[in-house]
Amino acid sequence: MVSKIKFITNIIKGKIIRKRIKLNPNVLLTENRDDIRYMVDFLREVIEKGADPKKTIFYQFISDIDKNFYYQPNKTVKEFLDLYKKSAKEGIKGKIPIMGFKDPFVKTRWFFCGNSFIKYIRNTTGYQLYDDASYVIYNDNTLRYVIPKTKLSQQAAYKLAIAIYLKYKSIPCVLLEFDEENYYALNCTEFIKEKKDIYKFLINDDKLRNFCHELNAIYMKRLKIKTDGSDKICFYQSFKKLKINGARDTEKRFKIYSLDKLLTKKHDVLDIGSNPGFFSLYCSKYVNSIDGIEPNKSCVEVSNYTKKFLGITNCNFYETTIEKFKTKKKYDIVFSFAVHRYMKTSLEEYLRRIYDLLKKEGFLLLESHTIKKFYSGWFTNCISTLYSAEELSFTKTVNDLVDKGLFKIVNYGFSYDGGENFNSKRMFYLLKKI
Ligand SMILES: C[S@@+](CC[C@H](N)C(=O)[O-])C[C@H]1O[C@@H](n2cnc3c(N)ncnc32)[C@H](O)[C@@H]1O
């Protein structure tokens, strides 16, 4: 609603002008829009060679959740092909919305597993396609509002791809002029560079490809953006074996926490806030059993679907919170990674609850939330101060419980585990119940 009001206000203030022009469609095939190149290839492969749409790079791209936007791939492909058939018969209807750029460089932006990246590219054509996946972001790097999806913008990329495929010499466009300073054009090319090899791999592996598509669909079906730490569009954890990128690198974390030295086939483990379950599933081969507790339904569905796909039998996921989790079982090891902030109780009460769930001499591997973020610019100091409060209360509470004789500190360390949190530092303790 706010974004719509802002959009209308901008029009009234005269920031956005609408002018009709005709352009050669190739002028809009700018270097940041490899997604449109994929669309053209898709038409070539499906229309001319009768290829299975699911085995095209375009299909892998649209069904990918790492880019921070996801449209149902089957529906999208059907709409695209229907639009192509209609356009081939009746000509492309309507005008393509575009943006005019005067500066020598265009600011472009893409997301990769929740992290945003910016690149300035040369403004070689003076124009950019305007479609519904573009954002307006201010200089402090915060996404303030998404440009409302105008009816006109929704099919802009598809119409452009069809025009290129059908070798149109010119297409009617409507020129929108925004404040260039505050506009970031979508850059799919840089995102695609990271994913191209995986897409090619998936095209040739029917089993893994179907699994990945289904997994993303399961995750997105019910996903609600929440403030309980499960608010990601991409997966929070990676799973290399399944070609799944994630905000945090599972294998790297396993090494940083030295779990290869701690886990044995005799251990029963509890993972509190298991999210998509990839970390629990990855650890399952090293232990006797592992239980994951996760209140987010989408995450639990993803965990169970992956568990079934991998044929893992010693892992169980419970759709609940730690507060509501009832069990008589005692665990050898409890994982609590980046989760205590979401508890309704204090950190001390939470750690006492974990204490009760542990066997005598059991271990708690406890990871903090972000304690330091590395930003450049004027922003740095205030952010660091904000996060260091977590470090202080985290270390203080742990040390209080050590003083009270509940735990002993066996090891501690810091994690910088890449992905979305590549600029975040976290602390962890390995504690032993006394
Ligand atoms: C920031 S994520 C961390 C996920 C995982 N522990 C990791 O580090 O990879 C926090 C997770 O805790 C879950 N969570 C939130 N409140 C919880 C609670 N009361 N009990 C158990 N899990 C909870 C969220 O749904 C989310 O999946």
Image (cartoon, rainbow, N blue to C red):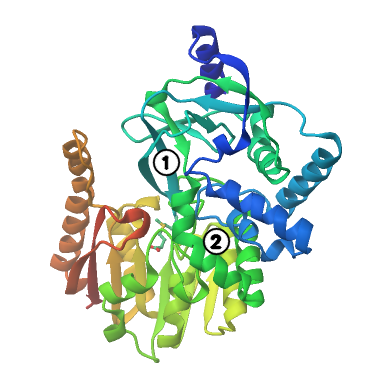
**From the viewer's perspective, is 99 left or right of 79?**
left
Q: Which numbered dot is residue 232?
A: none
Ranked by sequence position, the earlier of labels 1 and 2 is: 1
Numbered disc in front, either 1 or 2 = 1
Q: Amino acid at mark 1?
A: Arg
Q: Amino acid at mark 2?
A: Cys
Question: Dividing the picture into quarters, in which one does residue 98 lie?
Answer: top right
- Quadrant where the image shows the N terminus: top right
Ligand 1: image quarter:
bottom left
Front residue (pair 70, 326) = 70
Q: Position of residue 5 (x, y in %)?
A: 55, 17
Question: Dividing the picture into quarters, in which one does residue 183 lie?
Answer: top left
Question: Dividing the picture into quarters, in which one does residue 166 lie?
Answer: top right
Q: Residue at x 50, y 70 (%)?
A: 243
Q: Residue at x 43, y 71 (%)?
A: 279
Q: Position of residue 297 (x, y in %)?
A: 59, 58
Give yes or no for contact between labels 1 and 2 (Cβ–Cβ under 8 Å).
no
Pointer 2 local density, CA inside 10 Å: few below 14, some 14–19, many at least 20: many
**From the viewer's perspective, is 222 left or right of 370?**
right
Up the image or down, 244 lies above or below 165; here it is below
Up the image or down, 23 lies above or below 303; here it is above
Q: Which numbered dot is residue 299?
A: 2
**From the viewer's perspective, is 387 left or right of 52?**
left
Q: Residue furthest bottom?
A: 265
**From the viewer's perspective, is 163 left or right of 343?**
right
Q: Residue at x 36, y 58 (%)?
A: 419
Q: What is the secondary structure assignment of the residue under circle 2?
A: helix
Tag 1 residue: 109
Marks 1 and 2, how far apart in space? 28 Å
Asked if one can make out residue 328 in the rendered structure from this viewpoint, the answer is no
